[in-house]
Image: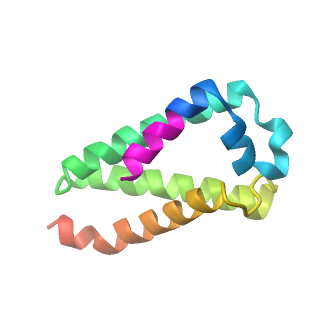
Amino acid sequence: MTSVAGTYNAIQNYFVIWQSKEVYAGKADEMTRLAGRIFAAWTALASVIRGMAAYNIHDPIAYNLAIATYALATFHFTAELVVFGGVKVNRASIGPLVVGWTGLIWTLTQRSHYIA
């Protein structure tokens, strides 16, 4: 699911940045088209890794890489909220924060179920 949503977000960021400006409402003026394309590439990579992990759920390397994508996203959005002030809690930023934290906690707590 997060792989599909991430793919949509990556495609969107290659063409328009208004949604990302809403996520980074604390510093929307710093969200440029270049930053949008960089974010799109980063999000596309995370989506590919998460999709591969979902398809190969019992592969420990794929599963650990998926955990890493959630950890990086969670760190990024939380740091932007708490430390850098780029993210303000609003309808656009709540999704990445919830998905990041939920995905990280879920993959960590369910790891032993999928990886024997």
Q: Nearer the viewer, residue 51 or 93?
A: 93
Q: Is residue 79 magenta?
A: no
Q: Position of residue 93 (x, y in %)?
A: 66, 57
Residue at image position (66%, 54%) is 92
Residue at image position (55%, 53%) is 73
Q: Quadrant of the C terminus?
A: bottom left
Q: Position of residue 50 (x, y in %)?
A: 35, 48
Characterize the magenta stretch by its predominant secondary structure: helix
Q: Is residue 111 left or right of residue 16?
A: left
Q: Position of residue 113 (x, y in %)?
A: 20, 72
Q: Quadrant of residue 4?
A: top left
Q: Quadrant of residue 87?
A: bottom right
Residue positioned most to the left:
116
Q: Is residue 9 magenta?
A: yes
Residue at image position (61%, 27%) is 37
Residue at image position (41%, 52%) is 2
Q: Position of residue 107 (x, y in %)?
A: 35, 65
Q: Is residue 82 left or right of residue 98?
A: right
Q: Is residue 9 left or right of residue 87?
A: left
Which span of residues is magenta-colored? 1-10
Q: Quick check: 22 above or below 94?
A: above
Query: What is the tally of numbered marks visible in this picture?
Result: 0
Residue positioned most to the bottom:
109
